[in-house]
Image: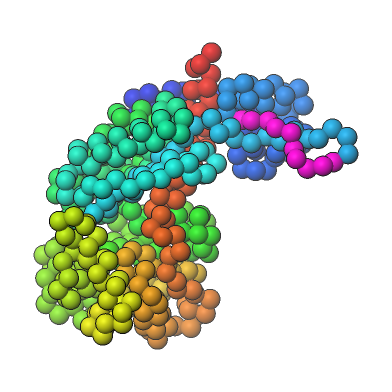
Amino acid sequence: MHKDDGYAEEPLPPTSVPLALRRVLGLVISGEATNRAEIARRSGLARSTVAQQVEYLVGHGILREVESRRSVRGRPPRVLTISPQAGTVVAVDIDTAASQVAIADLTRRLIAQDTVDIPIGAGPPAVLDAVSERLREMLEKHDRDPDRVREVVVGLPGPVDFEQGCAVQPTGMPGWDGYPVAEYLRERFHAPVVVDNDVNLMALGEAVQGRTEAPLLCIKISSGIGAGLITAGGDVYRGADGAAGDIGHTRALGGNNVLCVCGNVGCVGAVASHRAVLRGLGIPESSEDDLLYGTRVLAQRVADSDPAALHAVRQAATEIGEVVAVLVHMFNPRSIILAGPLSELRDDLVSAVRAVVYQRALPLATRKLTITATQLKGTSGLHGGIALATQDVFGPAGMARLLADASGGE
Ligand SMILES: [Zn+2]
């Protein structure tokens, strides 16, 4: 867990959970051991102690022990896994036109996902209420105990104070600046809540679900432009204040005097975002009954090889490529993933970004570099949220909470 302070129901510090219990659970979670004999061998604990701990964990619905389907001579070995009833994690990806929500079990298996059609401009209470309501329905429908939600992870499309769990001076998000998102959802779900920048979660989703090689850089091209970084060790790199990857307001070469929402001129987000491309082509972003009107029209024009649309997309890609080339030298990623509505437009965007990066960056940095569009069809943020939540649940504090919760039922 990253945010323990303020969590009203913080049960017991990690040290109060028996070491043997943590050791046994840890070996099963990490996959290092899948049965009692392996646990004994790896932990050095007596078989009787292992049996005692396993029975406790099975009895409290945290582990499940089933007969292996592997055909072996003699008695089939009994295999230990995380019980599907051990709990649920929740991921929320809040975006400009709509929000996505998902629930998953503690093995990161997706149980259900849905879209909540509410624009971010409706303000935090309306958006968070709609999202919470939909999640309640999903938990009920899939027979998941709402009291066993272990963590909620929320992505916001703007700068996020990771420690405080809120957005900080985001643009185009009226009412969200400093709004206590984490606190609000903590009261709804009685579980720890982590709030992160949406592109950080997308990057994590690409690394975990898309199995993209790290170090990884994910670039989201949407109403603005942002980047998420995953280190070689598989962690999100947030920088000192959580602002790492906030590249939308760096100066674009062809930015001229285009005014940006931040008050500066020539920001790459103002000249090369999806929103900027739509504006340049005179396509309205949304219509009365279709929040994604602009996305659909642009996709159609590109598919029809409309010269003006193709030119606008390539022009944007070139500007983005210049910024990405700088990041390549700074960060030396193994993979770059382009995400957001522009990335779904044929190969025009990806190849134009590639062309600039390979021309600008030095051979050592691009030798093994891959630049591709996301294959996760807009779900990378949810997958990243689920991954972050399960990492926390099985971290030292999360595990202590899980075990304390289980013993509290006695
Ligand atoms: Zn700007």
Residue 84 vs 300, above or below: the answer is above
Q: Is residue 298 above or below residue 230?
A: below
Judge left or right: residue 2 versus residue 408.
left
Is 157 placed left or right of 192 in the picture? left
- Most foreground residue, 9 or 378: 378
**Height in image: 215 above or below 6?**
below
State which quarter of the image contains the N terminus: top left
Q: Is residue 209 magenta?
A: no
Q: Is residue 279 visible?
A: yes
Name the quadrant containing residue 127: top left
Relative image position of residue 61 (x, y in whole percent):
57, 25
Image quarter of residue 238? bottom left
Q: Where's residue 114, x and y in %?
A: 37, 46
Q: Residue at 25% across / 79% down in the picture?
A: 309
| 64 is within the stretch colored magenta | yes
Residue with the most extreme right position: 73
Coordinates of residue 126 in the picture (x, y in percent): 19, 39
**Which quadrant of the view contains residue 62?**
top right
Q: Which residues are magenta?
A: 63-72
Give left or right: position of 359 versus 44. Answer: left
At 52% from the left and 22% from the top, the residue drawn is 406
Rendering coords of residue 322 (x, y %): 32, 78
Residue plotted at (76% across, 22% down): 48
Q: State the residue in front, 138 or 240.
A: 138
Judging from the image, the colouring scheme is: rainbow
